[in-house]
Amino acid sequence: MKKRERKERKRSISLGIVLFLMVGALSGCAKNAEQGEKNVVQDEKQETEAKETKGSEEVREITDMAGRTVKVPAEIDSVFSPKPTSAIYLYTLVPDKLLGWNYELNDIEKSVILDEYETLPNFGMGDSINYEAVIAEEPEIALNVGTINDAFISECDALSDSLGIPVVAVDGDLMAAPEAYRFMGDVLGAEEEAEKLAAYAEETFEDIAEMNVPEEEKIRIYYGNGEDSLETAPAGSEHAQIIDMIHAVNVADLEIGDGSRVQISAEQLLAWDPDVIVVNGEPKADMSGSSAADAILNNPDYASLKAVQEQKVYGTPNAPFSWVDRPISVNRLVGVRWLSGLIYPEYLNYDVDEEVCEFFKLFYHVDLTEKQLEQIYNGEITQSEHF
């Protein structure tokens, strides 16, 4: 009897120990579960706070040059340009952020554009923009350079809707170049480089303003485009802007059409009889400015022109882009230097060659040799002679 009691007592003690251990384990699990829930809640809270902090650091609100309020990333690595004017601004300031070009670069353009950028994709422009291709590349913003007006603002808004990214408007007027560069430098995190380009533009405008050309000595210029050089930019149009800037007289005092360029006849050119003729050629037909100038000089129909008789017919340098027009971007800054030196050498307070070389170094990222400079002036550049 006593033996059975001892066995039952031992069994009771064992059961008690087991129950105690089970209760302890369950209690521990409950505490661990509760702590786990607390940790999950805390982690979610920290993650949410981190996202909010990250978001506030990555996005900022700016006012672009059209007065539009735009939210852009604080750090921008890739920018889409919807037109050549924008692409040139981007290439000169931040080539590593340029998403691509708007057409296939020709051999003259490729001769100067750095190797790593001449092969960037062509996304098209205007109605031919490949929106799907742009969206697939995931640029942070688009930069649109143009004439600030209601139509341009609507264009920027529509582009933003199509791409699903912020579109930043920049004033494309040449005289606004210093302000435009400083604005873009702030948006794109390139303030130091932007200041160098802005300063060059400002100095260019100051040098031109100091040219005191007497009214009676102002040169009458005809500026021609196209294969026959009979498409011209009227006085006051943005395509003829640098002619007005350098104190010359644009003989094409015509009403400005919708396209800012007008077609004239050979008879009209003969009637104007300009002192100097500057021609751009036709890039689409691979016709250089120098070739267009030779065509006029050797055309018997133009033999009576004063500019032809005095051999003052000049082709616009066009490496990598035309120095006078097409496109109407900051490529024209160097054209201001060149054209003013061409027609008013006695009124200059600077050396044209030095300023052209400085422009190429700052804006196109290349150091010109004397031979290369001469080739550019004479329109003798090809891709085989890459800078």
Image (spheres, rainbow, N blue to C red):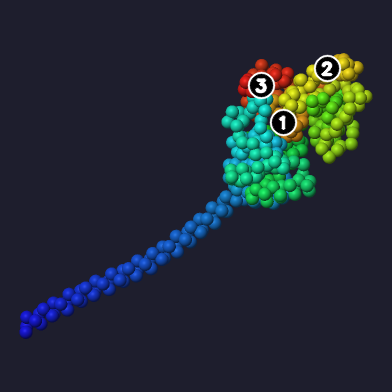
Query: Which residue is at a point 86% across and 37% down the rendered structure image?
Result: 256
Select label 3 or label 1 by which is in front: 3
Query: Which numbered tag is attached to residue 382?
Result: 3
Question: Which of disc 3 and disc 2 is earlier in sequence?
Answer: 2
User: Relative to 9, is 242 on the left or the right?
Assistant: right
Q: Is residue 196 visible?
A: no
In space, the residues marked 3 and 1 are separated at their CA atoms by 18 Å
Mark 2 = which residue? 297
At horizontal 82% and vertical 25% (from top left) the residue drawn is 228
Q: CA distance from mark 1 to mark 2?
A: 27 Å
Q: Residue furthest right?
A: 271
Q: Residues within 10 Å of mark 2 (few under 14, many from 20)?
A: many
Q: State the residue at coordinates (61%, 39%).
A: 99
Q: Nearer the viewer, residue 17 or 110?
A: 110
For the C terminus, which image quadrant? top right
Q: Which mark is residue 331?
A: 1
Residue 313 pos. (x, y %): 82, 19
Q: Check whether the beta carbons of the residues at disc 1 and disc 2 lie within 8 A of each other.
A: no
Residue nearest the viewer, comparing 222 with 131: 131
Mark 1: which secondary structure? loop
Question: Which amino acid does the dot numbered 1 rest on?
Answer: Asn
In the picture shown, does residue 8 fall above or below 113? below
Q: At numbered mark 2, what does the secondary structure look like: helix, strand or loop?
A: helix
Q: Secondary structure at mark 3?
A: loop
Q: Residue at x 48, y 61 (%)?
A: 45
Residue 282 percent coordinates (x, y): 76, 27
**Which of the marked residues, 1 or 2, is nearer the chain's N terminus?**
2
Q: Which residue type carries mark 3?
A: Thr
Confirm or deny contact between disc 2 and disc 3 (CB under 8 A): no
